[in-house]
């Protein structure tokens, strides 16, 4: 089975590689756009970009039920350990490590990362997941930054970018981000969950098509995008 990317709603994604299931930022409980529940989702690995509630909401319950390995920055991992979760792997910005499903590299992101109880969640990150079908970059929550060119130098097959505006970059800055990253495909995230971050994805899609060489892939919650073998 080739690698696939499933949109779960908001910034939550499930990546399936040949043999493994990887969750990024599971936020299903309290997410009006969620396509599944924290009780049902399968995971062996959970990647976390930053400490905000709309990214960590279900990490603990899914980790407890499934035994999935939590991979995050040092501060977020320490927080989960203080809550009694042992199966964790701490990394930090610029670091790369190989796991059974692929290689993970953490990148910078410009945002906050305070945890739900007010604890310091360190610096927010973006995540590159390197699979047999190419590199998948989940930007996390971030504004535009020109060092996205350096991330693009890694060779990005799929970029997952926030477009909701207000808390993260909006549609216009996402176009500049795509120009820096030069991915084959781009999937929008972090929009339409609430009225404050509502966006017109058909207008965004047209902008991507006219101003970049990337293919826009707009997923409804529950949709799966399969990466053909290269
Ligand atoms: Ni956030
Ligand atoms: Mn967020």
Image: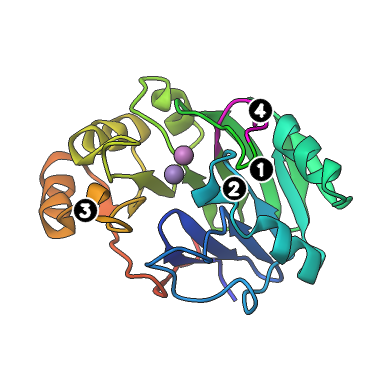
Q: Does dot 3 land on a helix, a strand or a loop?
A: loop
Sequence-earlier tag: 1 or 4: 1
Q: Is mark 3 within 8 Å of ligand 2?
A: no
Give the mark nearer the N terminus: 1 vs 2: 1
Residue 188 image point, x, y percent = 32, 52
Few, some or many residues within 10 Å of mark 1 (<14, 14–19, 20+): many
Magenta stretch, main secondary structure, is loop
Q: In this picture, which residue range is highlighted in magenta?
A: 118-126
Is residue 139 visible in this depiction of the protein? no
Residue 120 magenta: yes
Q: Is residue 40 above or below residue 165?
A: below
- Residue extending farthest to the front is 117
Q: Residue at x 57, y 54 (%)?
A: 24
The disc label shown at residue 17, or none: none
Q: In the image, what residue occupies the spot 61% across and 71% down? A: 38
| Label placed on residue 104 | 1
Circle 3 or circle 2, nearest the eye = 3
Residue 188 in view, yes or no? yes
Residue 198 tag number: 3
Residue 44 occupies which quadrant of the picture? bottom right
Circle 4: is it few (<14), some (14-19), or many (20+) Cα within 10 Å?
some
- Out of 210 and 146, give the one closest to the viewer: 146
Of the two numbered discs 4 and 3 on the same chain, state the one appearing first in sequence. Answer: 4
Circle 1 or circle 4, nearest the eye: 4
For residue 162, side relative to residue 57 (left or right): left
Q: Is residue 19 magenta?
A: no
Name the residue carrying label 4: 120
Q: CA distance from mark 3 to mark 2?
A: 28 Å
The residue under label 2 is 129
Q: Judge the density around disc 3: few (<14), some (14-19), many (≥20) Cα neighbours within 10 Å.
A: some
Residue 85 % position (x, y): 85, 52
């Amino acid at each position: 089975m080739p690698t696939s990317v499933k949109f779960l709603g908001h910034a939550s994604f499930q990546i399936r590689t040949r043999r493994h299931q990887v969750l990024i930022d599971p936020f299903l409980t309290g997410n009006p756009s969620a396509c599944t529940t924290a009780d049902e989702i399968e995971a062996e690995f959970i990647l976390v970009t930053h400490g905000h509630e709309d990214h960590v909401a279900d990490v603990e319950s899914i980790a407890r039920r499934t035994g999935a390995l939590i991979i995050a920055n040092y501060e977020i991992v320490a927080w989960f350990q203080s809550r009694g979760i042992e199966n964790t792997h701490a990394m930090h910005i610029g670091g790369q490590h190989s796991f059974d499903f692929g290689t993970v590299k953490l990148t910078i992101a410009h945002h906050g990362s305070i945890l739900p109880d007010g604890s310091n969640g360190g610096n927010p990150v973006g995540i590159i997941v390197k699979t047999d079908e190419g590199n998948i970059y989940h930007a996390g929550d971030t504004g535009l930054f020109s060092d996205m060119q350096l991330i693009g130098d890694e060779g990005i097959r799929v970029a997952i970018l926030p477009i909701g505006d207000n808390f993260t970059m909006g549609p216009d800055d996402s176009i500049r981000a795509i120009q820096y990253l030069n991915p084959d495909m781009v999937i929008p995230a972090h929009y339409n969950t609430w009225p404050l971050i509502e966006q017109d994805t058909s207008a965004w899609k047209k902008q991507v098509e006219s101003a970049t060489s990337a293919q826009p892939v707009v997923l409804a919650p529950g949709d799966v995008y399969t990466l053909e073998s290269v």
